[in-house]
Amino acid sequence: MVEIIQISDLHYGSEFVPEYMENVISYIDEVRPDVVVCTGDIVHKGRVVQFRKVIEYINRIKEIAKFLAVPGNHDAKNSGLVYFEKIIGPRRSRMIIENKDTIIVGICSARDDMAEGMVGDEQLDWTGRCFNKNLENRIMALHHHLIPIPMSGQKFTTVRDAGEILEFAEIFEIDLVLMGHRHVPHAYVISWKDSTNTTFLYCGTSTSNKVRADDKPSFNHIYLNEGDLEVYMVNSTNLEKSLLLERKAYHTEFRRPRKTRIEHLLASAVWDE
């Protein structure tokens, strides 16, 4: 079994709350996961001063656990991808955890000063070569959404070539795809042929007040074991845990953390005629 903490959308420089970050680091220190994965928007404006400040927190996490990060669209503002690579790490990377039979590949969907995401053929080819390994737990991480999610607003900022990445997940039998971007915890599970499936897992904003609706800042605590998956959403303000997803052979249960939009609409007085 591999144990993962997913954090995302720290947004250092805009509504970032140091107390939330301290809670996240305290939680990581207590559980000692195999790896911490950050799915982008570490800073808000891509400015070098923001990267230099937030790396103090990131380095504390690196002292506790392995760490992998991918850039988000806010990291790419103002030529920020250059400083992301100089200060945080490479824009795309591969991590193999041999004793956990796990491979994690982080790819860059961000582009300089663009809100929307794109992966591109060259990077898709690179990612395919990265996954040419016979490892049990196969994980991909990127910032932008591959599938739109509810209660996340109306901006069209999914990955432009999302169809290719979805097909990639099927061909390479990816267990888990980690994403951030719109600050809404959510999950989809797509079942492919031969009973294989991929979970597409989204993370909220972990350390800022840039939340949607009445969500709370949060991060994900993940257990992946030979296809079985448990995901707990952890509230960054008080570290309370709640089960978000449980995936077992032939059975998946997703516990929606909020009312759906249609439930709000049906409860509206507009319809009482």
Image: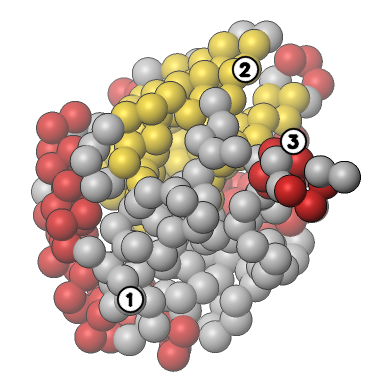
37 or 128, nearer to the observer: 37
The residue where tag 1 is placed is 14
Tell us which disc is closer to us: 2 or 1.
1
Left or right for 93, reference 86: right
Badge 2 amino acid: Thr
Q: Is residue 133 visible?
A: no
State the SS at label 2. Answer: strand
Give the mark, 1 or 3, whose residue is nearer the N terminus.
1
**Label 3 packing within 10 angstroms: few (<14), some (14-19), many (20+):** few
Outermost bottom residue: 78
Q: Is residue 230 above or below residue 80?
A: above
Give the mark, 2 or 1, whose residue is nearer the N terminus.
1
The residue where tag 3 is placed is 171
Residue 48's x, y, as percent?
28, 86
Badge 1 amino acid: Ser
**Label 1 packing within 10 angstroms: few (<14), some (14-19), many (20+):** few
Q: Residue at x 35, y 69 (%)?
A: 11
Q: Is residue 110 visible?
A: yes
Residue 192: image tag:
none
Q: Is residue 48 above or below residue 219?
A: below
State the SS at label 3. Answer: helix
Left or right for 256, reference 270: left
Q: Is residue 103 above or below residue 211?
A: above
The residue where tag 2 is placed is 252
Residue 260's x, y, as percent?
65, 40
Identify the image quadrant of the N terminus: top left
Identify the image quadrant of the C terminus: top right
Q: Residue at x 45, y 36 (%)?
A: 103
Left or right for 30, reference 255: left
Q: Residue at x 29, y 78 (%)?
A: 13
